[in-house]
Image (cartoon, grey):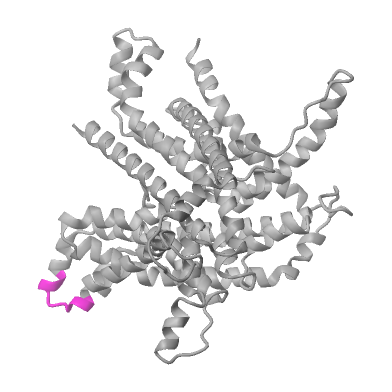
Amino acid sequence: MRLYAICVYLFLYIPIGIIALFSFNAGRHASQFMGFSTQWYGKALNNPFVMDALETSLLAAFITACLASTLGTMAAIALQGVKGWLRTLFDAMIYIAIMIPGIVIGIATLIALVTVFGWLNPLLASLWPDGANPPQLSMGMPTLVAAHTMFTMALVIIIVRARLSGMDRALMEASADLFATPWGTFRQVTLPLIAPAILAGFLLSFTFSFDDFIIAFFVAGSETTLPIYIFSSIRRGVTPEINAIGTMVMGASLLLLVAAQLLLRRGASKSNN
Amino acid sequence: MTERGRKALLLAPAGIWLLVMLALPLLVVFVFSFGERGAAGGYVPAFTLEQYANLPARWTAFKNTLILAPLGTIAALVIAYPLAYFLAVRCSPKWRTSLLILVIVPFWTSILIRSYAWIFILGGRGLPALLESIGIDDIRLINTPFAVLVGIVYGYLPLMVFPIFVSLDKLDKRLLEASADLGSTPWRTFRQVTLPLSVPGIATGCMLVFILLMGEFLIPAILGGGKVFFVGNALVDLFLQSRNWAYGSAVAMTLVVVMLVTVSIYMKFISRLGGQRQDVSLM
């Protein structure tokens, strides 16, 4: 039994280990180890295309995480005690956002936005004063962030709602009885209690947006995110440089996830006391 | 401000966001699936069932998905169950949490990079070279259904282990002792006590993996080399290469319907079991 478990863990970690190992390969060939070197890390970090893609990904992930955790938390708090059609509508949309494959969300967003922009652009042009260049709506960073925020916001609502439902409502009632304003109650009672969940939601949203390939592939327009860069490089062949990038990306995601995990754990133990 | 007004103000941004970025796009796909292809690609409004009638043209993609997704799910289940059993029943509690985190961690790192790792292992200089040295020649692994299957199992194993672990962990261990005390062999205890009680976890894991597999694009794209493609790959081709939006929308709608049917079968199955849906939290 134990031997079997070890085998499964090897199965899970050997591929990751191989990527990390080959990223330190001194040789050019991706599949033959020629000695230790960190040159590919240097090459990757000095490659302007990689750095551009990294910047795009980090920016998109950061804005997505900010928007998703703010709007998601607001919605989760407001949804407390809401019943009827509004509740059904929200639950249905959150459920659909999580269930529908990313690829369908990607293409649906692409064709919907391209169609809407196709109507809006002539309209904007006709409203604009003559001579000035009217703005052209097109797929790019804003549409990428909008699509990522849609999905991650649904995740944040679920996480924060779970935290709120585990919370003692008497605390908030007591606060109101002691003449705290709704804002005061939120800031001094609710927020400290749900802060770990919000932060975990923020980190999850960041990781999702940073790692996502399929939605970005459709809605990023001319922007290249890091996963899109990696995917198109793989299509052209495997290089140690991609291994170096992959190792760095996995390392960074791991750090974020461990942080999110610790925050959720600490939050849970605090509320149990 | 009234309580109602405050709630509306808090809910509005998220609500509008979901309507514009989720409900509207899905509605567009639904409407477009009844349309026609424009001369230069894109979409021309129409009401026709032609696109749906044309679905058999992409039969290979549906066939591959409908064969490899269930096969991958079953393979993941077969590999995951003993591990989940080990973690929940046999493993010492001291190690349990760490070992469980070790299962989940890969799931949260880029599936793109993890699938790509298998190009090394299954490619010419990886396993085939190793097999050649022990006398098995001419084995092609990369760009075969087998490679895609390995990628699938590798990618989704954590998602299968976790729900099964949860259901086995909840299981009252005294039941196992009682069964043993009553003279059952370990195998019989497993078959008549453990296995039936972990069915909800098995069902949840299978459904999660199956649903994600139905929409899979990356694993077949990286490990199938254009030879083994899923519906997801057909969709990318239809929207980004041939720009046939109407037909692509019909394919996407069909995929969603197949998935919804699967989920409702699962829900029926679970409610018949009388068990509650298990909460799966991967964080």
Q: Is residue B182 magenta?
A: yes
Q: Is residue B274 magenta?
A: no
Classify residue B152 as left or right of residue A37: right
> Which residue lies at the image location 54% right of the left edge and 71% below the top edge?
B68
Query: In this picture, is B218 found above or below A249?
Result: below
Q: In which quadrant of the rendered view does residue A77 lie?
A: top left
Q: Position of residue B122 (x, y in %)?
A: 48, 74
Q: Position of residue A146 (x, y in %)?
A: 60, 36
Classify residue A132 as left or right of residue A10: right
Q: Main secondary structure of the magenta part?
A: helix
> Which residue lies at the image location 23% right of the left edge and 59% below the top edge?
B171
Q: Position of residue B246 (x, y in %)?
A: 78, 54
Q: Where is residue B41 in the image (x, y as percent from the top left)?
A: 83, 53
Q: Is residue A53 visible?
A: yes
Viewer-side residue, B236 vs B88: B236
Classify residue B151 as left or right of residue B283: right
Highlighted range, magenta = B179-188
Q: In which quadrant of the rendered view does residue B248 lie?
A: bottom right
> Which residue lies at the image location 85% right of the left edge and 26% below the top edge?
A125
Viewer-side residue, B183 vs A244: A244
Q: Can residue B203 be seen in this view?
A: no
Q: How many labels does the image show?
A: 0
